[in-house]
Image (cartoon, grey):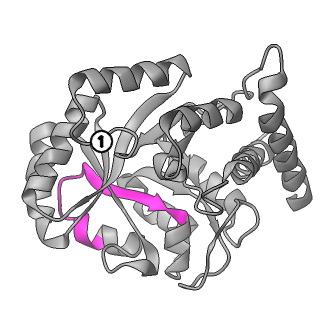
Amino acid sequence: MRTRLILLALLAISVAINAQNRPDPQPAADTYEKFDVGMAGYTFANFNLDKTLETMEKCDVHYLCIKDFHLPLNSTDEQIAAFHAKLKAKNVTGYAVGPIYMRTTQEIDNAFEYAKRVGVKLIVGVPNYELLPYLDKKVKEYDFKYAIHLHGPDMPLYPDADDVWNNVKNLDPRIGMCLDVGHDTRNGKDPVKDLKKYHSRVFDIHIKDVTAPTKQGYSVEIGRGIIDFPSFIKMLRKVGYSGKCSLEHERNMKDPFIGIAESIGYFRGTIATTAKR
């Protein structure tokens, strides 16, 4: 199984590298899953929107979680319209904004107005704990979903899925989590089990692989680390997850393109090889 997935990933790399040379590029086969493969904007922290969209086109990925370095929070309506026009030209949809860090009520207000002007109804954010009651009010006011991004052992806010759940379980059901499987694993948790337990509050997923279930574990291409992606994908199906699984690639971020293609290829290969025939 693992050998086959590696071969599929290598094939995806070759396809991505040579896509621009094909006279008539063909899209990836439909997986017929409820969930979609997407891209987290943070993957392209060192690149502009044009390079981001070029890479997504080569990898045949059509959903982007929008980061503010590509579309600033103070963007005008004209800038937002131009941004969406660029995405549309590459057959990409911006499905959410974030992660956005929120340390004051004003920053929460700004984020919700930003999401409204951008035209999405999902915010991926990191609010200070004491702001959760105010966040609860804003979710009710705007009727948006809010996915708290967990960060493993690297910061005190929301280290894993358990922590997010314990802080939101009594709040509006539109407040949930962005399950970052790598950070969850690095905090000693099992993202497969956490998806099963908390799926009703999982509104977005960031996929990556890591080398160890500790703070010393670091990010690697999907398929090279310790996360059990076949089991994770089977759990996505079991719980009926219908959101995005967006690659947040954090290795070789100044030259991430081969790693991006390898990770997308491995993830799609795993979808194919675990599907019921």
| Residue 74 painted magenta | no
Say which quarter of the image contains residue 53: top right
**Toward the viewer: 247 or 228?**
247
- Amino acid type of the residue tagged 1 in the rendering: Pro
Kindly identify which residue carries mark 1: 72
Q: Give the residue at x 15% y 54%.
A: 107
Tell me the SS state at disc 1.
loop
> Where is the C terminus found, in terms of image quarters?
top right
Visible residue check, residue 262: yes
Q: Give the residue at x 25% y 48%.
A: 174
Give coordinates of residue 191: x percent, y percent.
Answer: 54, 67
Visible residue check, residue 241: no
60 left or right, relative to 42: right
Q: Which residues are magenta?
A: 166-181
Characterize the local packing of mark 1: few (<14), some (14-19) or many (20 or more) Cα atoms within 10 angstroms: few
36 left or right, relative to 234: left
**Toward the viewer: 188 or 34?**
188
Q: Is residue 208 above or below residue 87?
A: below
Q: Is residue 119 above or below residue 242?
A: above
